[in-house]
Amino acid sequence: MVDVKLHDIGEGMTEGEVIHLFVKIGDHVAIDQPLVEVQTDKMTAELPSPAAGTVQDILVGQGDVIEVGATMVIIDNGKSETIKNVKREASIQKVSSSTNDSMAENVAISRSNGPRRILAAPHTRKLARTMQVNIENIEGTGRLGRITDEDVERHASGISVLSESAASTASVEEPVTHSDESGYDDIPFIGRRRAIAKKMAQSLYTIPHVTHFDEADVTDLLKLKATLKELDADFTKGYNVSLAAFFIKAIAIALKDFPIFNARLDEERQVVRMEKAVHMGLATDTEEGLIVPVIKHVERKSLLAIHKEMKDLIKKAQQNQLKRDEMTGSTFTISNVGPLGSTGATPIINYPEVGLMAFHKTKKMPVVNDKDDIVIRSMMNLSMSFDHRVADGGKAVAFTNRIIELLQHPEIMMLDLK
């Protein structure tokens, strides 16, 4: 017998949520065949079978939150090892009560009038793309309305079927999503959304946040960007570098002078570890929620290299195709919310980092220059959140001023070229 346990799949995780079971009791499995899909605070991962054999028992259910080290599946591999300490009750915290479970089974037959949030595992979304099926048109029959592989296959063949549990309770149970007449709608608080909530609460309640606001004149930076675009009119040279790449490079340069913001506080050892490498996290909005892909060693990379890698990582994030090492290890994070129309915010730090900088919408505004002339300039707001345990306000202001200097005079960045 082989116990398949939840192991640490990224940066000291302590627990994960089961969001999909690929097998059932009695199934024959091969080595490395996916058994369980687990959602952590950073990623979704498929956990494979370590041995070939028959599924003897499944000790977890969809929606269960389990601790690292907990047994999920037992595989009969034809050997007679003794199973020890395998108790569902000892390792699993049930996500919801029996009342919520019965309500959840009904979500597949009730839909609100507004746009719905699509609940589907990455492998299910991939299957839908492969079968050329629009996943938004599929009615999910899984728990809390989650779309399953079977739903995709049925939709592709033109068959629409409710799950047995949903059909059997349709006439007697209240759906979890309420109609407009009741005055509110309920949506599932599971998977990545719940993982994000836990991560944000951990950061906000652990780190004493302070946010410094400032603005940068990016008129010359926009002119440089436009010039590069003109030099690559046929889009063959890759000169059309995004503003975000300049933001990342400016921060990497500034962190050389202010390494305290490229650090993390180790309270147990009572030290502040200042990292030498700059691994930039990119706060990215996706269909399933916030995710932070990471560009490693930005201090070594050119603007063009940063731009290309950033585009690739964001595309992978949107398609839920990031690998574990592409979303772990960040030492500082940026949030480029300007394209979304944001003019200001107090961003929450990506724990356990020390700082996060948000770049907001650029607007043309009248500005008084050094000659007391009123001129029109392109102004952009910045907000820098930092851990006040590690750094004081004066340092944060000086750090922000250095970044502003680099953005207002982008030619200075040339001095950092290697």
Image (tube, rainbow, N blue to C red):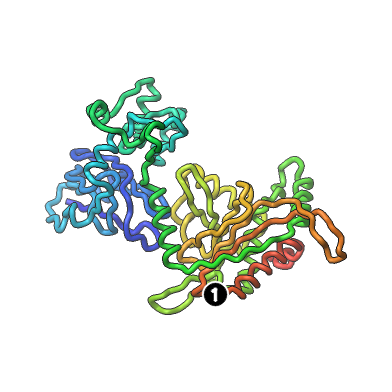
Query: Which residue is at 12% across, 56% downward?
Result: 82
Relative to 344, 220 lies left or right: right
Residue 337 position within the rendered picture, expressed as x and y whole percent measured from the top left: 60, 51
**The C terminus: image quadrant:** bottom right
Is residue 306 among what the camera can see? no
Residue 303 position within the rendered picture, expressed as x and y whole percent measured from the top left: 67, 57
* Label 1: how many Cα within 10 Å (few below 14, some 14–19, many 20+): some
Q: Is residue 287 above or below residue 254?
A: above
Query: 177 or 216: which is nearer to us?
Result: 177
Q: Is residue 257 above or below residue 75?
A: below
Q: Is residue 4 above or below residue 391?
A: above
Query: Which residue is at 83% across, 63% downward?
Result: 369
For mark 1, what is the residue? 391
Helix, strand or loop for disc 1:
loop
Query: 296 or 191: which is nearer to us?
Result: 191
Relative to 218, 158 lies left or right: left
Residue 42 position within the rendered picture, expressed as x and y whole percent measured from the top left: 42, 54
Relative to 78, 12 lies left or right: right
Q: Quadrant of residue 411?
A: bottom right
Query: Which residue is at 38% across, 25% downward?
Result: 155
- Number of marks: 1
Which amino acid type is marked by label 1? Ala
Relative to 390, 55 lies left or right: left
